[in-house]
């Protein structure tokens, strides 16, 4: 199998799976229990929190474990609106956020919130100025992702954070950094909320984290209950998943520079190989080393995905979750119909090789030469 869909989810390294198994089988105590089996787990949770916090460069007491990126996004948005409930009910976000943000905003409009969706340019870019211009005296929250999951575009979150105070000092800033885990320091980024997810970096599914900065002094709890996660996200901790998350972070941190170099090289190589195919062009500005979006203009993406899948190659369509229609991100680019319908996303990880990309390119050449394009 050739797996080129790391932006969807990542394989779990054996060392991570073993750590998860070890916790499940040997250390099953409830961290709230008052005997050694539980107390030990409590200590471990704090050690794992320190590990993840150190990768994000944030104080551990500002980092809260969640069940996934979607949960972190929803919590951040609701907590920001709660803190700024006396300021106003306006939200600024982009039309190319992940559905975790967009669907949450959609529900908020039913509660009377007013949402401004910023449109990207033809390359998928959003400028800091565009965001700042949209901020009003009643803007409670700005939510702009760090790395676009379909295009790989990088958005200027640090620049927005730097200038937001001069436009509205009370507006809070959230960034969905699910696709940018190892690319930032929370301290330097300056966002008030940062969402990350474990399964995009080699952890098991079902664990993530939300950083909540010091400007949010008393965050609105996501789940009030038994006091876990400092009372802000109650529920017995998912100890095995959190252990796996910390282990995955530790492994990636140990090879951070090499992995970055490897991914940079792979993307460059993939771009060269793929753009040699007639009718194939890159989509979006890109920027993140692990994501490459391309269109085989005229060949419907779902057919490409199915054809490659039959050869054991996993890539995703820009229309993956949308029943054959271009995704909201691809739609926002306002591409010609043939270009929009042919978009596929390749995404890479530490274990991806040039040979994987060669096989994918060969399959795409073959698809281009043997399948009928749409009229
Ligand atoms: N945000 C972005 C940018 C993503 O790519 C994803 C997952 O694909 C999510 C949020 C949701 O994360 P999770 O699957 O952990 O809920």
Image (tube, helix red, strand yellow):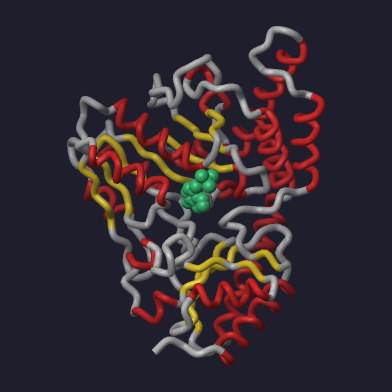
State whether residue 95 is above or below residue 352.
above
Q: In the image, what residue occupies the spot 55% across and 88% down?
A: 368
Can you give x and y, in whole percent of width and height, for residue 206 in the image?
A: 59, 39
Compared to 208, does 273 lie above or below?
below
Quarter occupied by the C terminus: bottom left
Query: Residue 287 appears at what percent x and percent y?
Result: 50, 63
Q: Position of residue 124 (x, y in %)?
A: 38, 65
360 or 194, which lies in front?
360
Tell me if 155 is positioned left or right of 128 in this view: right
Quadrant of residue 207 in the image? top right
Q: Is residue 210 above or below residue 115?
A: above
User: Is 347 placed left or right of 246 in the picture?
Assistant: left
Which quadrant of the view contains residue 285?
A: bottom left
Q: Quadrant of the N terminus?
A: bottom right
Q: Which residue appears at 74% of the width and 17% of the height?
A: 40
Q: Position of residue 269 (x, y in %)?
A: 64, 75
Which residue is outermost to the top? 34
């Amino acid at each position: 199998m050739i797996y080129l869909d790391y932006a969807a989810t990542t394989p779990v390294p054996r060392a991570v799976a073993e750590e998860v198994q070890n916790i499940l089988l040997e250390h099953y105590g409830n961290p709230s229990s008052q005997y050694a089996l539980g107390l030990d787990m409590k200590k471990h949770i704090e050690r794992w929190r320190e590990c993840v916090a150190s990768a994000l460069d944030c104080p551990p007491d500002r980092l809260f474990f969640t069940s996934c990126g979607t949960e972190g996004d929803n919590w951040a948005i609701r907590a920001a609106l709660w803190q700024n409930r006396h300021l106003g009910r306006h939200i600024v976000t982009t039309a190319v956020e992940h559905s975790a943000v967009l669907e949450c905003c959609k529900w908020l409009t039913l509660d009377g919130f007013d949402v401004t969706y910023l449109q990207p340019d033809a390359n998928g870019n959003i400028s800091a100025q565009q965001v700042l211009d949209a901020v009003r005296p009643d803007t409670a929250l700005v939510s702009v992702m760090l790395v676009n999951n379909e295009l790989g575009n990088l958005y200027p979150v640090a620049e927005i954070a730097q200038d937001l105070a001069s436009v509205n000092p009370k507006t809070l800033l959230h960034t969905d950094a699910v696709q940018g885990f190892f690319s930032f320091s929370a301290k330097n980024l300056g966002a008030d909320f940062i969402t990350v997810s474990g399964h995009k970096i080699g952890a098991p599914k079902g664990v993530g984290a939300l950083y909540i900065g010091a400007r949010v002094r008393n965050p609105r709890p996501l789940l009030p209950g038994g006091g876990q996660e400092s009372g802000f996200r109650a529920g017995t901790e998912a100890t095995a998943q959190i252990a796996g998350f910390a282990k995955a972070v530790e492994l990636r941190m140990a090879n951070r520079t090499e992995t970055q170099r490897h991914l940079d090289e792979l993307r460059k190589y993939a771009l060269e190989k793929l753009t040699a195919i007639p009718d194939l062009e890159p989509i979006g500005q890109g920027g993140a080393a692990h994501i490459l979006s391309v269109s085989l203009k005229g060949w419907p993406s779902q057919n490409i995905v199915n054809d490659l899948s039959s050869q054991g190659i996993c890539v995703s369509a820009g229309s993956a979750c949308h029943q054959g229609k271009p995704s909201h991100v691809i739609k926002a680019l306002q591409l010609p119909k043939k270009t929009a319908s042919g978009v596929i996303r390749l995404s890479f990880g530490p274990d991806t090789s040039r040979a994987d990309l060669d096989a994918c390119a060969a399959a795409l050449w073959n698809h281009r030469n043997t399948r009928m394009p749409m009229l």
